[in-house]
Structure formats: structure tokens, C-alpha cells
Image (cartoon, helix red, strand yellow):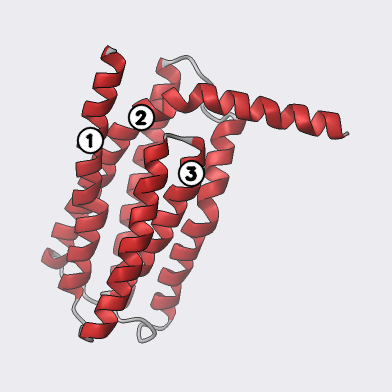
């Protein structure tokens, strides 16, 4: 029994090491698509008057769903291009590592829908940023080292943002909330995507 367990885990680790290149090549397009989605939703939110707890949460959960589906599409296309199985054991390990923190973020959003007075809207992006950063940090154990750092920075930024917003006693302002979401889930992702694009290109040329 123990030998089988050890062999299975060794096989998973070996396969993950082989698949790192696959995940790495898909990361830049994923960052561009995620960032583009974040910027689009942050611009359209105020224009469409998404300015109440229920609509704000639904709006950004929809943005997250769009980004997630685009990520699955890009990763699957890369897997097919490399003639690799998409829903493999390593892929499941990555997905499983993402579920707890993402579920925490979704639960926080649902709580806002139920009672829109428990969290001031500008504070919600800070919570989401921290949960998202935790998810990236966990997934980073199965991908490039930079992803762990990227996630760690999100956690730190979200925590600092939460403290600053509390100290400044920010009033209820959905424009600020949309702006924060656009910066972190839009602009920063685009910037990281640009970095990945050029660094991976230089690595492939070597």
C-alpha cells in the first residue's frame, strides 16, 4: 500500500516537472486575457451604473468566470498543440490548489449579496486580491517560481490596501472599487504578461 502511494506521488512529481514548460508557455496569453477582461469590466462597470452590492458582486464574479473559461481554453489549446493530455493528474493538482482560496473569495462575495452592509464596497477588492494571491501562490508550487512571487505580492498588496482603506475611512464609492479591480486584475496582469512574453521568448532562443 505504502509503495503504491509513494510510486503514485513520485509519478505525479515527475509529470509536473515535465509539464512546467506547458504551463509556462500558456501563462503569458492567460495574463493578457485575464488583464484584458479586468480592464474591460472595470471600464464598463461605472458606465453601466453597476453601483449596488448585488450587481457589483455579480458583475465581478462574471468577470472571474470569463477569465477562468479563457484560461481553460488557452491551457487546453496549448496541451493539444504539445500533444499532451489536458485533464491529467498534475492539472488536477493545480485546480485543487486553487479551489480553497477562490471559494473563500466567492463566499465573501455571496455574503455581500445577502447583506450589502457588512463590507464597504471598496474593501471587497482588497479581500478578493488577497484570496486570489493566495490561490496563485498555491498554484505556483506546480508552475514557475515567479508565479509564487506574483501571488505573494498580491496577498501583501491586498492586506496593505485593507489597512489603508480602514485608516482613511473610505466612504461607499463604487468607482473606487471598480478602479481597484481594474488596476489589480487588469493593468498588473497585462504588465506581468508583457514580462512573461519577453522573458520566455529570450529563454526559448537560448
Dot 1 crowding, Cα within 10 Å, few <14, some 14–19, many 20+ = few
Q: Nearer the viewer, mark 2 or mark 1?
A: 1
Discs 2, 3 touching: Cβ within 8 Å: no
Q: Which residue is mark 3?
A: 139
The image shows residue 78, relative to residue 109, as above or below, that is above
Q: Nearer the viewer, mark 2 or mark 3?
A: 3
Could one spot residue 91 in this view of the protein? yes
Q: Secondary structure at mark 3?
A: helix
Measured as percent of width and height from the top left, residue 166 is found at: 28, 83
Measured as percent of width and height from the top left, residue 193 is found at: 24, 37
Q: Residue at x 39, y 23 (%)?
A: 78
Q: Earlier in the sequence, mark 2 or mark 1?
A: 2
**Of 30 and 146, which appears nearest the observer?**
146
Dot 3 crowding, Cα within 10 Å, few <14, some 14–19, many 20+ = many
Task: Tally the numbered discs.
Answer: 3
- Res. 127 image quadrant: bottom left
Q: Which mark is residue 195?
A: 1
Measured as percent of width and height from the top left, residue 196 is found at: 27, 33
Measured as percent of width and height from the top left, residue 117 is found at: 35, 86
Residue 26 relative to residue 185: left or right: right
Q: Secondary structure at mark 1?
A: helix
Q: Which residue is mark 2?
A: 26
Q: Earlier in the sequence, mark 2 or mark 3?
A: 2
Q: CA distance from mark 3 to mark 1?
A: 19 Å
Amino acid at each position: 500500500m505504502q509503495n503504491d502511494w509513494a510510486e503514485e506521488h513520485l509519478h505525479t512529481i515527475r509529470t509536473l516537472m515535465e509539464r512546467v514548460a506547458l504551463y509556462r508557455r500558456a501563462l503569458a496569453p492567460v495574463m493578457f486575457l485575464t488583464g484584458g477582461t479586468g480592464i474591460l469590466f472595470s471600464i464598463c462597470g461605472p458606465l453601466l451604473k453597476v453601483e449596488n452590492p448585488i450587481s457589483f458582486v455579480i458583475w465581478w464574479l462574471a468577470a472571474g468566470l470569463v477569465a477562468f473559461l479563457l484560461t481553460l481554453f488557452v491551457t487546453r489549446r496549448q496541451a493539444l498543440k504539445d500533444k499532451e493530455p489536458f485533464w491529467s493528474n498534475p492539472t488536477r493538482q493545480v485546480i485543487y490548489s486553487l479551489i480553497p482560496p477562490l471559494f473563500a473569495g466567492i463566499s465573501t462575495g455571496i455574503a455581500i449579496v445577502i447583506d450589502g452592509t457588512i463590507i464597504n464596497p471598496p474593501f471587497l477588492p482588497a479581500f478578493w486580491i488577497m484570496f486570489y494571491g493566495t490561490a496563485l501562490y498555491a498554484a505556483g508550487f506546480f508552475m514557475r517560481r515567479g508565479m509564487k512571487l506574483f501571488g505573494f505580492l498580491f496577498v501583501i498588496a491586498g492586506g496593505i490596501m485593507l489597512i489603508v482603506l480602514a485608516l482613511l475611512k473610505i466612504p461607499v464609492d463604487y468607482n473606487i472599487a471598480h478602479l481597484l479591480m481594474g488596476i489589480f486584475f487588469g493593468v498588473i496582469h497585462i504588465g506581468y504578461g508583457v514580462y512573461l512574453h519577453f522573458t520566455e521568448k529570450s529563454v526559448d532562443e537560448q
